[in-house]
Image (cartoon, rainbow, N blue to C red):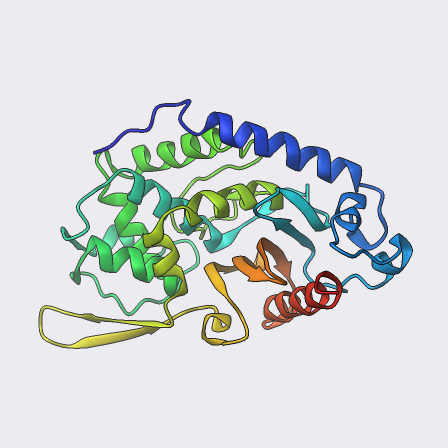
Amino acid sequence: MRRHSPGEDSLKHLVWGITLTLALLSGAHAEDGVSAAASAQLPDPAPGPEAQAGAPGLKSAMALVLDQSTRRVIYAKNADAVAPIASITKLMTALVVVEAELPLAETVAITQEDVDEVKRTRSRLRVGTELTRRDLLKLALMASENRAAAALTRAYPGGTRRFIAEMNQKAARLGMSRTRFVDGTGLSSENVSTAPDLARLVDAAHAHPLIRDFTTGAEHTVELRNGKTIRFGNSNGLVKNQGWQIGLSKTGYISEAGRCLVLQAHIAAKPVIIVLLDSWGKNTRIGDANRIKKWMESNFLR
């Protein structure tokens, strides 16, 4: 199992953290959540007041849009608020599994320990189901399968407790200073973070082709030992929308967190990271993502 040295990620994310913090501070008093730094970054910017007045009216309680290549904040709304993140947690779960280089072909069985006793969520993976670590990882990321994520956590060398410690250590190395994990599924409302911290997580996860592939697949079918198959779909319908160029996607929901969504995508010829937290309606996070896309294409392609 590969171990990352504590300083391996530090320099990159320290520089990004300083850039992101300065950008957020510079726009802390901008109207409608639009930073001054964002307005200055338009290739052919409209006057500041007009750009702010035309900002997307998002329904998510917290939001961040970041230019991934320059680390510049394009849009921010309550970005520094600490909030539950639900199944966005599974991105960190995947990051720990992938960077540990555990054998993906190894079979892991679903046990009673993996059953959700917190929210009593349902699962089509019955106790006794055996799947490869690769299949479990794909289901956890694409379909947000809770038992799959719990099994990945439990089957880690050292067990669940060690895995959670690795999640929090990785968060610290990425500069996610306001983030805390207590499980690998996101079912606990004690898994908390901020929009800037999650942007760092998305950026780190996007560096792994496997995570990019698993989060953006439209569906995946697993075959059980008895020959039966189960088909799972992606929890984010935008991955099937040809109008989007999505490089990474993860959804999340528990009642305490509301509807959440993080994306890496290309919009208006820019690689961007979008973080949407605590959307109040079932489809609001998707609507907010589309509003951001429309707003950027209207302002950045002039």
Question: Looking at the image, how many numbered discs can be counted on the residues?
Answer: 0
Write the residue at 81% across / 45% down: 36
Q: Residue 59's spot in the image, x, y percent?
A: 71, 64
> Would you say residue 12 is visible in this rendering?
yes
Q: Is residue 179 above or below residue 144?
A: above
Query: Splitting the image into 4 quarters, where does residue 107 fall?
Result: bottom left
Find the residue positioned furthest to the left.
226
The relative height of residue 287 versus residue 86 in the rendered view (above or below) is: below
Q: Position of residue 53 (x, y in %)?
A: 87, 61
Camera-nearest residue between 178 and 270: 270
* 179 sits left or right of 294 in the view: left
Q: Quick check: 20 left or right of 43?
A: left
Q: Which quarter of the figure has residue 32?
A: bottom right
Residue 23 position, x and y percent, is: 72, 38
- Residue at left 69%, top 56%? 61
- Image check: 15 left or right of 146? right
- In the displayed structure, 147 sits above or below 27; it is below
Q: Quadrant of the N terminus?
A: top left
User: In the picture, which quadrant includes the C terminus?
Assistant: bottom right
Give me the residue at 45% from left, 49% from top: 89
Asked if residue 115 shows in the view, the reply is no
- On screen, residue 215 versus residue 148, left or right, reads right
Q: Position of residue 62 (x, y in %)?
A: 68, 52
Residue found at x 41% / y 51%: 90
